[in-house]
Image (spheres, rainbow, N blue to C red):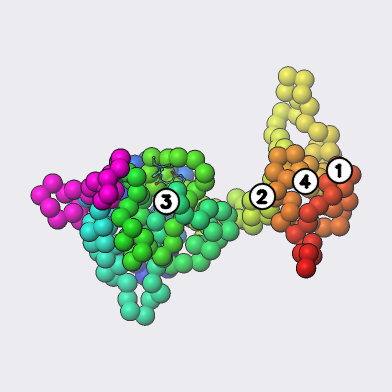
Amino acid sequence: MSRLCDKGRGGMRFDILTLFPGMFEGPFGDSIIKRAREAGIISIHIHNIRDFATDKHHITDDYPYGGGGGMVMKPEPIFACVEHVLADVLPEEEAPPIILLTPQGRLFTQQVAMELAQRRRLVLICGRYEGVDERVREHLVTDEISIGDYVLSGGEIPAMVVVDAVTRLLPGALGYAMAPLEDSHAMGLLEGPQYTRPAEFRGWRVPDVLLSGNHAEVARWRRQQSLRRTLERRPDLLASATLTQEDREFLASLGYRGPFSDDKREE
Ligand code: 9D3
């Protein structure tokens, strides 16, 4: 028997508050997230903020005080929806973070994903329109997250990004395929090139070292490709990566002179 509920199973619970619940049907019904839900590793609960508006037309937005364009999300339905979601949090349980997805939030990185993966529950509020009434920020929300410096239409896709990145960090979510620690962003370097069969395609050969069967040589080559690619595309990552003396010598041969993560700061 499979249970889709996390009650009593120790899985992580996501509560997502949105004005567009339909947006979540596709992405969470597939692949890793679907398997994680079926395995009881996570549960996802979607709440329509509109259901918590008490007026006749279930209005969730209004004009901004002081004038100006656009609309602002009203506070009452958001507070009511969060209070509904938190109704079953026991007094001895830790209070779940109430996270607002907003362009003004702190940048979502692998480190933030790892931090959130430590929690039992996450409450994610998806902003829409020009934003939410400031009292939601001041008196309800405990954390604000942005997924990057580009303009989206709302917090729904960012919430999906957070659920995906956090879920794949949870024990068992990836099956046996790969430990999350092997992910290049967790390691602080980009991955090098990868190949599969055939060994020759349209005259383009797979590098000989990969066919050699010499595991030490393969590991060394991969590490160097990873360093080379990181230097070419994301040199900013090298400054905080954990590098061996051999890594540094290889980077030096490519012209990299630092900075390194263990550089002593100027006094
Ligand atoms: C036209 C209004 N914008 C002025 C630049 C402000 C604005 C408000 C709301 C821009 C986008 C949005 C909707 N986006 C989000 O709610 C959002 C978001 C994003 O747009 N980019 C990256 N991360 C996030 S998290 C939520």
**Residue sitting nearer the eye, 9 or 185:** 185
The vertical placement of 188 against 265, above or below, is above
Kindly identify which residue carries mark 1. Answer: 255
Residue at (80% x, 39% y) in the render: 210
Q: Quadrant of residue 195?
A: top right
**Amino acid type indicated by mark 3:** Thr
Query: From the Cβ of disc 3, is ligand 1 less than 8 Å away?
Result: yes
Q: Amino acid at mark 1?
A: Gly
User: Percent x, y for residue 97?
Assistant: 41, 65
Q: CA distance from mark 3 to mark 1?
A: 40 Å
- Inter-mark Cα distance, 3 to 2: 27 Å
Q: Which residues are magenta?
A: 51-73
In this figure, which residue is indicated by the disc labeled 3?
102
Provide the secondary structure element on which disc 3 rests. strand
Residue 121 higher or lower than 126, as above or below: below
Q: Mark 3 or mark 1, which has the lower sequence index?
A: 3
Q: CA distance from mark 4 to mark 2?
A: 11 Å
Residue at mark 1 to residue at mark 2: CA–CA distance: 22 Å
**Callout in the foreground (1, 4):** 1
Residue beneath label 4, please? 227
